[in-house]
Amino acid sequence: METSNGDDRAQAGATASEAQAQPRRSVEEMKERLDEINERIKGFIRQRPAACLFGALALGYLVARVARRGR
């Protein structure tokens, strides 16, 4: 039996809706994961502010050395 044009359109519309929903779910999951990571980093910085400051200074120094070496 053949399906009618209306059934084909409805099925295509449902498939298109599912295809749009998948990336949205993925984006939402990534946002949640990034929020969790951000909170963990903030907690680490609050617990060890001096270590983070010295780490940032060391990283800045290394980046400056590498940038100067390129000249």
Image (cartoon, helix red, strand yellow):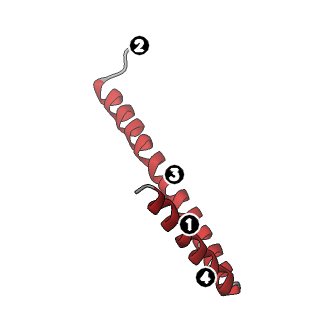
Amino acid identity at mark 2:
Met
What residue does disc 2 label?
Answer: 1
Sooner in the amino-acid sequence: mark 1 or mark 3: 3
Give the CA separation, mark 3 to mark 2.
38 Å
Q: Give the label, 2 or 4, closer to the camera.
A: 4
Q: Nearer the viewer, residue 70 or 15?
A: 70
The quarter of the picture where the C terminus appears is bottom left
Amino acid identity at mark 3:
Ser
Q: Position of residue 30 (x, y in %)?
A: 53, 58
What residue does disc 4 label?
Answer: 53
Q: Give the label, 1 or 4, closer to the camera.
A: 1
Label 3 sits on a secondary structure element that is: helix
Give the CA separation, mark 1 to mark 2.
72 Å
Amino acid identity at mark 4:
Leu
Q: Where is residue 41 in the image (x, y as percent from the top left)?
A: 63, 74
Q: Give the label, 3 or 4, closer to the camera.
A: 4
Give the CA separation, mark 1 to mark 4.
14 Å
Q: State left or right for residue 53 relative to residue 15.
A: right
Label 1 sits on a secondary structure element that is: helix
Question: Relative to residue 56, is residue 1 depicted above or below?
Answer: above
The quarter of the picture where the N terminus appears is top left
Q: In which quarter of the image is residue 36?
A: bottom right
Q: State left or right for residue 66 relative to residue 45.
A: left
Q: Give the label, 3 or 2, closer to the camera.
A: 3
Please tell me how crowded label 1 is: few (under 14), some (14-19), or many (20+) other residues with Cα within 10 Å: few
Q: Which mark is residue 62?
A: 1
Q: Quadrant of residue 33?
A: bottom right
Q: Quadrant of residue 59?
A: bottom right
Please tell me how crowded label 2 is: few (under 14), some (14-19), or many (20+) other residues with Cα within 10 Å: few
Sooner in the amino-acid sequence: mark 3 or mark 4: 3
Q: Which of 66 and 39 is in front in this view?
A: 66
Instruction: Looking at this view, name the residue that lies furthest to the right.
Output: 47
